[in-house]
Every structure is written in structure tokens, then in C-alpha cells.
């Protein structure tokens, strides 16, 4: 990935675009402090390397294209205070889910249901930055529209949103700025490179 420099203000969305393998996911994971990378990332004047990882990830939330789960049901992946909060019911409803989805086995949930649950999970604790990797790729048009509307609401609330996407329409509708990563360079076994 080439050196990058950009700034995103509260209430703004940066769409990261590029071909598969160009580094979109790697960029988001590096900002979230999940993968090592050279360079500096600041949020409200605090630099990523100066903040303990768990504290950074409460401020900067990454939602993977294929979210991970560490229990049999989503409920255990939400903080107890989130489960007892009426706001969770509204957030679930806004993306077409109900509290009953929290108690279904992960393996029974559809890919789209898991994706929307991961999005709602990321909203808990009201992070300042949302890093969304292909947030609507696994969703039917109706569910995608619901998630898109919730991303827009997060922008209205002043959050910073970075999203990676292959969907030019989504990038156009949501982003204030677009960052196009170059096509990855292929290196052959003999060391010769090709674009």
C-alpha cells in the first residue's frame, strides 16, 4: 500500500475504494490498531500508539465484512449494560432486527443478519469513529437501505465514518470524500512485476 495522508472531520464519511487486494481492509484494520503499520493515526489529538489498544478500540470501532463472534449467540457479544438499555431495541429495529435475534445461534443466522448485528454491536458505547468494511455487501436491497440510513444517522450524530466499498453508488450517496487505492501490483515468481 502506498503512503497515505488524509483527514476526516466529525460528521464526515470517507469512502475507501479500490480493486480487491488494493489494501482497503488492511487500511481500516491498521487504523483500528488490529494490524501493525507504520505511520500515525490521530483521533481528537490522541495518537494511536499512545493509547492502550482496548481504549483505542472503544473510540475507533472496526466492523469486518465477515464479522467474528466469540460465543454461540450474539447476546454474549454485547456488554450487559447494552442489553439492558432500551436504545438497543431501537437500534435493532432500525436495521430490521429484533431482540430475539440476540438469542439465536450464530450458525442459524443469515450472513445479512450477522452483518447487521455486528453493525449494531459496533454502535454500543457510542464510538467516535466507525470503520465499516463493505457494510452492505451481504445485504438484500431492503436491509442495505436500512443500514445505509443508520450510517447516515451516525454522520448526523457527528461520528467519523470510513467505509470500504466496491459499491460506487453507496460511496457517492454517503461520502464527503473518496480515496481510491491503486490497483495492486502483481509480482511474479521470477521477481518481475506487472500491474
Image: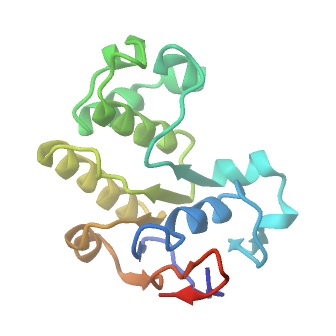
Q: Nearer the viewer, residue 128 or 166?
A: 166
Toward the viewer: 147 or 167?
A: 167
For image coordinates 39% across by 82% down, the residue present is 178
- Please indicate, yes or no, whether residue 128 appears anywhere in the rendered image: yes
**Quarter of the figure with residue 37:** bottom right
- Residue that appears at 38% across and 56% down: 134
Q: Which part of the image, by quadrant, shows the N terminus?
A: bottom right
Question: In this rendering, does residue 84 appear at all?
Answer: no
Q: Picture coordinates of residue 124 (x, y %)?
A: 52, 39
* Residue at x 84% of width, y 52% of height: 52
Image height of 188 relative to 156, above or below:
below
The answer to whether 66 appears left or right of 50 in the picture is left
Residue 119 position by quadrant: top left
Residue at the spot x=53%, y=62% of the render? 25
Residue 3 at x, y = what percent? 66, 87
Residue 18: x, y in percent? 40, 76
Which colour scheme appears in the figure? rainbow
Using the rendered view, name the quadrant where residue 19 is placed: bottom left
Amino acid at each position: 500500500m502506498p503512503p497515505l495522508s488524509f483527514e476526516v472531520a466529525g460528521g464526515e464519511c470517507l469512502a475507501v475504494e479500490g480493486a480487491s487486494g488494493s489494501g482497503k481492509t488492511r487500511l481500516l484494520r491498521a487504523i483500528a490498531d488490529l494490524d501493525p503499520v507504520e505511520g500515525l493515526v490521530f483521533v481528537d489529538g490522541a495518537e494511536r500508539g499512545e493509547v492502550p489498544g482496548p481504549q483505542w478500540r472503544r473510540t475507533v470501532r472496526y466492523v469486518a465484512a465477515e464479522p467474528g463472534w466469540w460465543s454461540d449467540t450474539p447476546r454474549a457479544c454485547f456488554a450487559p449494560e447494552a442489553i439492558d438499555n432500551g436504545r438497543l431495541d431501537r437500534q435493532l429495529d432500525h436495521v430490521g432486527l429484533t431482540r430475539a435475534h440476540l438469542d439465536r445461534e450464530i450458525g442459524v443466522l443469515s450472513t445479512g443478519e450477522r452483518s447487521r448485528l455486528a453493525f449494531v454491536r459496533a454502535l454500543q458505547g457510542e464510538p467516535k469513529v466507525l470503520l465499516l468494511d463493505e457494510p452492505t455487501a451481504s445485504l438484500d436491497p431492503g436491509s442495505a437501505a436500512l443500514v445505509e440510513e443508520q450510517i447516515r444517522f451516525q454522520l448526523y450524530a457527528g461520528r467519523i465514518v470510513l467505509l470500504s466499498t466496491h459499491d460506487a453508488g453507496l460511496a457517492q450517496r454517503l461520502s464527503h470524500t473518496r480515496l481510491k487505492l491503486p490497483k495492486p501490483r502483481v509480482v511474479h515468481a521470477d521477481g518481475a512485476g506487472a500491474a
